[in-house]
Amino acid sequence: MLFFSILLGKLSSFFIKAILHRNASTWPGHLALESNPKLIKNILKDNQNLKVILIAGTNGKTTTTKALHHILESNNISVIRNDSGANLLNGLASLLIKESNLNGKIYKDALLFEVDENSLPLILREVKPESIILLNLFRDQLDRYGEINTTSEKWAEALKRLPTGTTLIVNADDPQIVRIAKSSNCKNYFYSIKDSLKTEKVLAHAVDSTTCPNCRNNLSYSKISYSHIGNFHCEKCNFTNPKAEIINVETQLKGSFNIYNLTASIISAEKVFGIKKENAISSLENFKPAFGRQEEINYKDKKIVMLLSKNPTGFNESLKIVLENNYSNLLLLLNDRIPDGRDISWIWDVDFEMLTGRKLNITISGDRTYDLANRLQYAEFSNLYVHEDLNKALEKALEKTSKEQKLVILPTYSAMLELRKILTGKSIL
Amino acid sequence: MRTKRYTLNPKRSLSIGWLYPELMSTYGDRGNIIVLQKRCEWRGINIKIVRINQSTNYQLLSTCDLLFMGGAQDIQQEIVQKDLNGKKGEIIKSMIENNTPGLFICGAYQFLGNYYKDAYGTEIKGLGIFNMHTESPKDKPRLIGNIVVKAKNNPLTTSSKLSATSYLIGFENHGGRTYLSDKTQAFAKVIKGHGNNGEDMTEGIHFKNTIGTYLHGPILPSNPIVADYLIECALVTKYGKEVKLKKLDDNLSEEAKINILERLKASY
C-alpha cells in the first residue's frame, strides 16, 4: 500500500516537473494522501532515525530554518527541508515522497519543516516531532488566520497532547508563546537576547499581546525588543519571562529579531543534536540569509536589498533597518492575494511616520498600489512614484538609485515571488 | 432658506475621543484616526486626540467633539465591555443622542446595540444606543471579504450625479450578524459583500450623527467623504453654524476605489 502511494507520488512529481515544468512541492503529496491518508505516519514510522523538527511562528521561520539547516550540515548531519510555501500536510507528504525510495526509506538524519500559524495543529495530528521551535505570534492575515488569541488557543490545545519527551525551543520574550509552552507537558528550553539589544522605547501601535495571557490584566514592559517581544511583567498574577539562555551571536543580519532567530537555531542544534554551541556559532559565520530576507542582489549594475514585509511587525522592523542605514531609495510592493492576505487594512498599523521628513525616493507598485500610496500621503511623504506595473516600477526605482546607493525593496509575500522571477529568471513555487 | 457659509479661522478646534486605542485596534482602524487628524490639520483646524482607556476619568469623555472606537479580539472586547457598563457608557449615550458625531467599527458597533447573543445563546447587554441586536451563530462561517455599499442617508451622497464616490468600499471580517429594528436606519445598502447579516442587504446603522459599520479597510482612508461628513457634523454641533470644508486632493483614494469596484464588477 505504502509502495503504491509513494510510486503514485513520484510518478506525478515526474509528470509535473517534466511535462508541466512546474515545481512539484505540493501536488504529489496531495495525490498520494488521497490514495493513502496514513502516508505521512507510515513513512515516519519506518524512519525512526529521522529527527523531525517543526519551526512555527508568524515571523522568522524561513531564516531560523535556514540557519539550523546550515549548522546541521556544517556538522555532518544530513537534512531535508520544505520550501517555505509548501507548509501544509500536502507539502510534508510531497517532501517525504521526494526524499524516500520506493520502500519508504529515507537515508537522512533530520527533517526540518516550517509551518504557519494555521497548520501547526493540523500537522501535529499526523506527526509527533522530536522538537518544535516556537518563535512568536503576531497579527498576520486576519482574514485567513483569524485573531491571534484564537490561534494561540489552538496551539495550546495541540501542544498539550504531545508526549513529555518532546523538546520545545521557546522564545522567552513573547508572553503568548511562553504561556503556551508552559501549559504543555514538554521539555522547555527558553531563549532570549541581551538586554542591551532591547532598545525600543515604547510599545508600537501594532502590538497584540498587551494583556496578560493568564489573568488578562495589563502587562507592563521594562525592556522592549520590538512589537510585544521584551521583558514583561504582570502586576496582578506575577506572570513574567522565564529564565532564559542568551547567546553572543555575531551576524551581518540586521535587526534584533534576527538575533532571536539565530539563537533559536543554535539552541535547537545543541539540545536536539548535541552540537556544541561554539561549533554552531562558528558555522553561522558564513551563513547567508534566505531569498528576500536581507539578501543583497546585484541586478543591472545596481545593488538591491530585499526585506520581506508581510505584516505590521515585519514591516516596522524593515522600516527601522531603512532608518538606521540611511537608505534613501525604496520600492514598496503591496499585493492582496491569498498568500498575502486579502485584507490590506494592516498597512495603517505600520508606523510609516518614523520616516516622515526624510529625503526619500519612494516608488510604489503591486495589486493595491493606490491604497499604499494613499497611506503614505497621509504620512506626509512627497516624492511618491506610482506604477501599477511591477516591471516598470522596478525600472523606475533603479533609475533613481545611483551606483553607490542601494535600492531597498519591501514586498509582501507574493510580490517577493514575482520579483524573484524578474530578478533571477526562475520561480520558487 | 439660504444658509450662512462659515469661513474657518485657525482658532476652530476639535477634540477626537479615541476609545480604547490599545485594546480596540486589531484591524488597522487607527487609519481612521490618522485620516480625521490630517484632514483637519490640512484645513487649519486644531485637532487634539484624546485617548480614552480603562484608567481615564469619564469626565474627559464629555470634552470630546467626535468619538471613535475600532474593532478587536474577543478577550479585549470583554475588558472593554466591563469598563463601558459604568459611567462611560452613560456619557457616550447622552453625547450621541445630543448629536455628537461618532464612528463605531465592527465589535464597537455591536456594543452600542441592545444586546449581543453569543455562540452559546448567552445574551450580553449592550449600551442600547442603537436600536438593533447581534447574534453570533455557532455553525455559520465568518463574513469575510471586500465589500461595496452605497450610503443611504443624504448627507453622504449630496452629489446627485451618480459617480464612483457614491459608492463606499471596505473589507469586512465578522462572525456576528446584526439585525436592525428599523431597517430605514441602515447606514448603507450592500452592493457586493455581506453587510449587517448577509441576508437583508443592509450595512451598518446611521443614527443622529453617528455611524456604526462593519467596514474595515479602514473605512475613512478609502472613503474620505465619510471622514468629511463626521468633521462637518462635529464643527456644526460645536459651533452651531453651517460649515463648508475646503476640498482636498483625494485622487489616490479615488483610484484605489475604482480599482476595487472594477475588480468586483460593481457597476458605477
Image (spheres, rainbow, N blue to C red):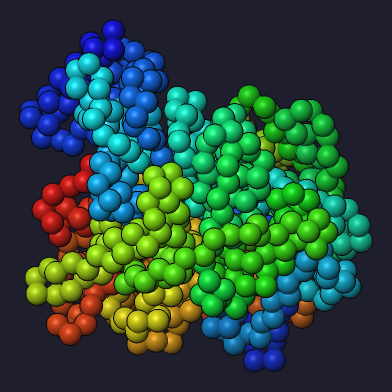
Q: Is residue B85 left or right of residue A270?
A: right
Q: Is residue A70 left or right of residue A343?
A: left
Work out whether residue A365 or residue A264 is closer to the camera in this orientation and state it.
A264
Confirm whether residue B140 shows in the render: yes
Q: Residue A399 is drawn in which quadrant?
A: bottom left
Query: In this view, which residue lies farthest toward the top?
Result: A1
Q: Position of residue A14 (x, y in %)?
A: 12, 26
For the C terminus of chain A, which image quadrant?
top left
Query: In this view, which residue lies farthest toward the bottom?
Result: B10
Q: Is residue A153 left or right of residue A312?
A: right
Work out whether residue A338 or residue A170 is closer to the camera in this orientation and state it.
A170
Vertical comparison of B15 with A67: above or below: below
Q: Position of residue B33 (x, y in %)?
A: 61, 69
The residue at 86%/42% (across/down) is B125
Vertical comparison of A370 with A28: above or below: below
Q: Is residue B216 left or right of residue A94?
A: right
Q: Residue B202 is drawn in which quadrant?
A: top right
For the N terminus of chain A, which image quadrant?
top left
Number of marks in picture = 0
Q: Position of residue A196 (x, y in %)?
A: 54, 77
The residue at 77%/80% (across/down) is B239
The residue at 48%/79% (across/down) is A354
Confirm whether residue A341 shows in the render: no
Vertical comparison of A152 with B160: above or below: above
Q: Position of residue A45 (x, y in %)?
A: 38, 20
The residue at 70%/33% (across/down) is B136
